[in-house]
Image (spheres, rainbow, N blue to C red):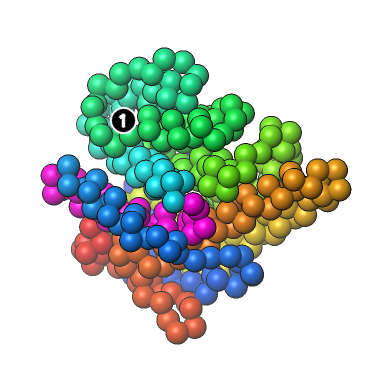
Amino acid sequence: MADNCLTATTVSEQMLNRLRGKTLRIPDLWPLFKDWPRGRHQDYSSLREIFDDALKIYEKPKRDIIASAEPDVLAAEFWPEAKGKELSFLFCYVMWQGYLDEVLENLQNYDQAAADTFRQEVCKYVDGALGFGPVPYIKRGDPILSAFTEIANALKKHCPEDTLHRLSNAIHAYVHSTAEEYRCSRSGTVLTYQDYFELRKKTGGTAPLVVLAEYASRAPLPDSVATSPAWLSISDAVCVIVGLTNDLLSIKREMYDGSTLNAIATIFHDDPALSLDNVVARIVGDIESAVERVEEGEAELLRSTCTEDPKRAEDIRKVLRTLKQNCTGNLSWSLGTTRYGLEIATDGSVAIELGTKEQVVCLR
């Protein structure tokens, strides 16, 4: 990947300067998702209570960081049909992964070696909690981080070992990808769109959620399905959809943080002659292509299983329904969260003014 990077901080700053002052116009994204299901869980209020109780143990600065991500809303819209117990544990996982990201970011800003060590500790901790070895002690006795033990215990009651292995591998990939993301951001690296695309599918943290769709649907899939080319294409496509949707709608916040690790910035860097409207059109086209891949993969899997194993075909339908809800729930959360501060026009479009750093300070 390094061969395809420009690593001077000045290049990163020049890219941000080229974007500042422009207006990003994003069309209504809902038509891309056709008839995919969406909604908010009817027991959302119970998540809010859990969330409020969890926040009480933190001091105000840390509490504000967690609250700004609105993980309760995200979980309610990611899994609108999950059963009560499953929804609670899925919500706890969202909080765990989101807070882990904050811990890593804060730690590596002070000590990269310590952050790398902590990543190793977290991966060992996850493996132990999922039953693949002893559960090691994490020096940071943080209640949210240690909550993964409870999440893992719930998963082990309902998920076969194959599913747990896939979850472990996905979490490992996510945790270690944050180190690469940080190094690129710290050095001012501007990746090519292709290289960024591959990194984003891991750093977005969606791959573990793809595995958890089996738990949310109460429909664990055998490895023969979950490792098939069709399913791997579906999983990859869901990561693309969630990642690129967030890239479009979070650009103002990313610019405030001085980051060029965003699809808009990388495409703009790859082809400076493109207008911003054309950059958006390319990303929207990639989301649309990923939606098609999900539907094509679903059709292929159902063709091969409907007659041979109707029960398995029904499980595939259930998990695919959940994954589609993940995609639409992510869009709904992104459009509505105060974290991004978006205003939606009557036609469903969004216009984002890419102002100076001072003009977007309110996002913090």
Location of mark 1 (residue): 146
Crowd class of label 1 (few under 14; some 14 to 19; many from 20; radius 10 Å): some
Q: Residue furthest left?
A: 59
Foreground: 357 or 243? 243
Q: Position of residue 133 (x, y in %)?
A: 46, 15
Residue depicted at x 71% and y 57%: 295
Check residue 79 for magenta coloring: yes
Give the quadrant of the C terminus.
Answer: bottom left
The secondary structure that most of the magenta stretch takes on is helix
The stretch of residues the image draws in magenta is 58-83
Residue depicted at x 25% and y 34%: 143
Q: Quadrant of residue 236?
A: top right
Foreground: 11 or 75? 75
Q: Is residue 242 left or right of residue 12?
A: right
Residue depicted at x 26% and y 61%: 363
Check residue 330 for magenta coloring: no
Q: Is residue 321 left or right of residue 255?
A: right
